[in-house]
Image (cartoon, helix red, strand yellow):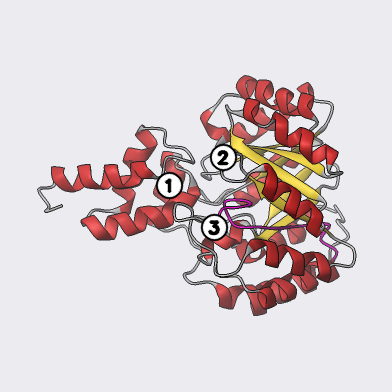
Amino acid sequence: MKIPRITDTTLRDGDHAVSHSYTPEMVRTIVRNLDDAGVPIIEVSHGSGLNGSTIQQGFSIHSELELIKVAVETVKQAKIASLFVPGIGTSNELREAAELGISVIRIAVHCTEADVTEQYFRLAKELGLEAVGFLMMSHTQPANVLVQQAKLMESYGADCVYVVDSAGALVQSGVRERVSALKEALSIEVGFHAHNNLGLAIGNSITALEAGADQIDGTLRGLGAGAGNAPTEVLVAVLNKMNLDTGINLSILMDVAEEVVAPLMQVPIVIDRDNLSSGYAGVYNSFLLHVRHAAEKFGVKASEIMEELGKRNAVAGQEDWILDVAVELAEKKGLKV
């Protein structure tokens, strides 16, 4: 098993969990500690990617470009990455982030929509960026479909393609099958991004490595959408126990996770009923805050909304379905809408 490259996405995926409230001071502190610890890639952007600060995705308190600028100015050795979702971000934001000094762009789409990414991979390479493909909601498609989509990204210039478990819905056999298929079919690197809704974020990440993954993601204290991600400090500890030396200082990670990130948590990152129902139903994790608001407004359970969204195969960009489902459930219960 090879030593993976670890990307810490506390300052992107974790943005969901803090309601997009990161400040320049928070970013500077977290980036400095991650950099000092030797984490090679640090992702910074709105949780939904560049230009994600909208009424649909949630407004940021501070401009992500300001936060990216702080991150780039702070690092001494790490590379700064950002997430880019076509349709949320545009070429303008991609160019602006490149001008600020990011080194890696992670281009994310639903796992059947790789064909919309070509212009952005081409642009990323023109801008001199490392370009990573993100196949979100990978649990919804079999391995052969993911291979087809990953090969499109590879043909557009991707340096790596990730199997992304956006809902925390995959079990280990599903991870192994998908990662192995991509490794066999591609000539570029393969990555894996976990969520913890079924309590498998660490286990699935290790399974991905056993299947040949070259890159894996984590967040400090598991801070991320829904039930959070594989905790970066735990990943490093487990890899150390497996005699896979990442070169990352575990002591620094534990300290910043405990002393800096934990106090930022608005609610504990746990596998509660809502998060478990999201993973079990296979619903996109960033829906959770919207679902909870709708559940409270219409007097229904968030888990009931999740179950119905899962039946309808709701994906990113279909947040308006949440209110529709909540209203329907409330009406069925005879509640006043």
- Give the dominant element type of the magenta stretch: helix, strand or loop: loop
Instruction: Tell me where residue 60 sits by quadrant.
Output: bottom right
Check disc 3 and give the amino acid type.
Ser
Residue 121 part of the magenta segment: no
SS class of the residue under badge 2? Answer: loop
Check disc 2 and give the amino acid type.
Gly
Residue under label 2, please give it.
Answer: 87
Q: Is residue 331 above or below residue 292?
A: above
Q: Where is residue 289 in the image (x, y as percent from the top left)?
A: 42, 57
Q: Which residue is drawn at 60% across and 56% down?
A: 13
Q: For the magenta stretch, what is the residue range?
A: 38-52
Q: How far apart are marks 3 and 2 (CA)?
A: 13 Å
Residue under label 3, please give it.
Answer: 53
Q: Which residue is drawn at 82% across and 71% down?
A: 74
SS class of the residue under badge 3? Answer: loop
SS class of the residue under badge 1? Answer: helix
Q: In this view, does 55 lie above or below 188?
A: below
Q: Which of 153 and 243 is in front in this view?
A: 153
Residue under label 1, please give it.
Answer: 278
Q: Where is residue 141 in the image (x, y as percent from the top left)?
A: 55, 26
Side of 188 where 20 appears, left or right: left
Q: Distance between the residues labelled 3 and 1?
A: 24 Å
